[in-house]
Image: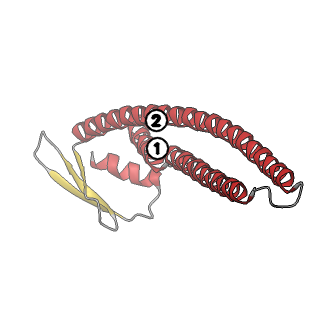
Amino acid sequence: MARATEPFAEAVQYIKVVYQEYCKRNDLDTCDAIEQEISDLVQMCSTTEAEIRQTIKDLSKHVRDLETVASYPHRDGLHADRVAALQRQIDVAKRLIEDMDVQARTAEQQCEEVDARLRSATAAAREAAAGSSSIAANLKSQLAMYKHITSTTWWPGKPTISGTVSDTKTGDIRVFDFDQNISQFELINKLWDLL
């Protein structure tokens, strides 16, 4: 009697393993998080680039304004003051460009890290898919063999545990219908009696 319960318990265990594998979303969530980080980095780079472009436009306008105003009939030293102001703005622009370069390198490194994480997550997803498909195929084969050996047909969708057991020698078909609250031990004993 102990041998009859082992294949049934093993089949239930395989079904649980397949269900748990299909319910995992870790790899999908990781891929979604990586894609969101990439999107955020692209947005940050675009915003910073737009700000730098605007600063350059503003500086170019100031240079043109100063060139038109920088005529000598003005007070002494005005030209030198404006040149100094321009030099300060150029220094600020250089610092902004250096900061932008640092941010660009940082963004490139982050993109490379994100790409590496995406590749590893994709590989892990492929391995998980390959593993679960082989387990599912094995489980399918075992369930088919169980059905063939026991000649048991299940009727899913009913509020009870029900189905038929057929005897190939005599041609008899025995219907069973058990309450779902029955213990597993009792259920297996009653099914074994029918077989």
Across and down, in percent, residue 40 comes to: 59, 52
- Mark 2 → mark 1, Cα distance in angstroms: 8 Å
Name the residue at the right extreme.
76
Q: Quadrant of the C terminus?
A: top left
Mark 2 surroundings: few (<14), some (14-19) or many (≥20) residues within 10 A: some
Mark nearer the N terminus (2 vs 1): 1
Residue 128: assigned label: 2
SS for callout 1: helix
Across and down, in percent, residue 138 comes to: 34, 32
The image quadrant of residue 11 is: top left
Residue 21: assigned label: 1
Q: Nearer the viewer, residue 118 or 168?
A: 118
Residue 157: assigned label: none
Residue shown at 40% from the left, 32% from the top: 130
- In the displayed structure, would residue 85 be above or below residue 13? below
Q: Quadrant of the N terminus?
A: top left
Whether residues under marks 2 and 1 lie with C-beta atoms below 8 angstroms apart, the answer is yes
